[in-house]
Amino acid sequence: MPKNSERSVASTQDLGPSAQDPAPRTRHPEPSSQELAPRTLFVTGGAGFIGSNFIRHVLSAHDGVRAVNYDKLTYAGNLENLTDIKESERYRFVRGDISDAKAVAQVFAEEKPWGVVNFAAESHVDRSILDATPFVDTNVKGTQVLLEAIRQQPVERFVQISTDEVYGALGKDGLFSESSPIQPNSPYAACKAAADLIALAYAKTYGLPIVVTRSSNNYGPYQFPEKLIPLTVRNALAGKELPIYGEGKQVRDWLYVEDNCRAIDAVLHKGRIGEVYNIGGDCEKQNIDLVKLICEILRNHPETQELRPRIQFIKDPRGAAHDFRYALDCRKIREELGWGPRMSFETGLASTVEWYRANRPWTERVITGEYRDYYRKIYGACAP
Ligand code: NAD
Ligand code: TYD
């Protein structure tokens, strides 16, 4: 697989191919730096988990790219996620809301972006069940504001970051393909589905250069500790219970965030306009097994071997909206763009747990009083 376009990513993670990685399936090389001669990317939600990893990836992989990070800095947005690149001449941060059409138009006029990658969203299912309003405002209205912005001021590419959750739930068998029905169950998933479909409608109706990605559950550094993996590590380190919803039988497909960033990069530059690309990790785990694996990793570390984390099964706060299983058929992105996940789950999970262990002050800093209120609403008695 020709990899001359990609340089090593500045991170502590093992991003190289592992023994368990699939054989390279590239038919088309990933985009080279020359193809990307100075281009400004308008990246929304770049202070969040995947967005910050993506900005780091794209600046490291392509010399000719500038990133303008447009982020509202909600509870989930944290500029500390980008400390290492904040002085780069190829990076600019603008605080703003994607549903503020005037503010978006102003930055568009200043920057004349080559492309847009829309990560900005309210992203947590449990919060959408408590209050769906910000999900409609940002995920639906905000996306439509961005789509109107590219109608007014054309760009070469617009990537709408969507999710496997738009397909709804699977039973024990089967996979979702890009043509599976859209059947979201939670308010979060419904708002993401609305945005995804509006984006595809704008592509068709107005001939705009829009591509949609639907990825499975990401994991890796800088994820806000309301999501299962960072929350479990934080609670274990703090000697608190590890909450499992229901019996923990639900299944998620885990994708290392850097693998997703490479996939989004490939879709941005080589994806076919008006198309959807599934991006999965080919790594299904039951929640209970994943939490036990995290406990085992901590037990095997000299600094945390004394910990005795306790799992606590709690009443499922998602009720009927808790999707049993997600799993993706990713043949399209493999065959068209030559993308496949490189990180093995074993290495990826171990390095992720280690990142949260070593960066415990980061976790504690990003948690605000608002987090504690939220935690009490969801977890009740076992709140920290
Ligand atoms: P995140 O919650 O960590 O980050 C979201 C970012 O968006 C934050 O920086 C926040 O400040 C910003 N934001 C929120 N509302 C905004 C607004 N109105 N205007 C501007 N910025 C705003 O989310 P994430 O996990 O990094 O997810 C990024 C995207 O990927 C989302 O669109 C999400 O739906 C999608 N996705 C996530 C996963 C996952 O496993 N995390 C899986 C599939 C798809
Ligand atoms: P989460 O990380 O919130 O991602 P998503 O809802 O997008 O899949 O949750 C992953 C799974 O873990 C999901 O089935 C809900 C479950 N879960 C728990 O059992 N306990 C928890 O404390 C959290 C946050 C999630």
Image (spheres, rainbow, N blue to C red):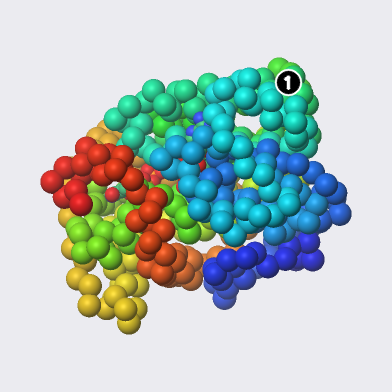
Image quadrant in which you'd find residue 153: top right
Foreground residue among 168 and 160:
160
Image quadrant in which you'd find residue 93: top right
**x, y percent for residue 74:** 45, 37
**x, y percent for residue 8:** 68, 67
How would you rate the neighbour count of disc 1 (Cα within 10 Å): few for under 14, some for 14-19, many for 20 or more? some
Q: Residue at x 46, y 27 (%)?
A: 191
Seen in the picture, residue 76 relative to 80 is either above or below; the reply is: above
Foreground residue among 100 and 271:
100
**x, y percent for residue 35:** 85, 50
Left or right: residue 157 versus residue 45 is: right
Q: Residue at x 63, y 56 (%)?
A: 85
Q: Quadrant of the N terminus?
A: bottom right
Left or right: residue 313 versus residue 6 is: left
Q: Check mark 1 vs ligand 1: CB closer than 8 Å? yes or no.
A: no
Left or right: residue 376 versus residue 325 is: left
Seen in the picture, residue 27 relative to 142 is either above or below; the reply is: below
At label 1, the amino acid type is: Arg
In the picture of the structure, the residue carrying the numbered disc 1 is 151
Spot the residue most to the left.
Answer: 381
Q: Residue at x 41, y 32 (%)?
A: 188
Residue 336 seen in the current view: no
Secondary structure beneath label 1: helix
Image quadrant in which you'd find residue 303: bottom left
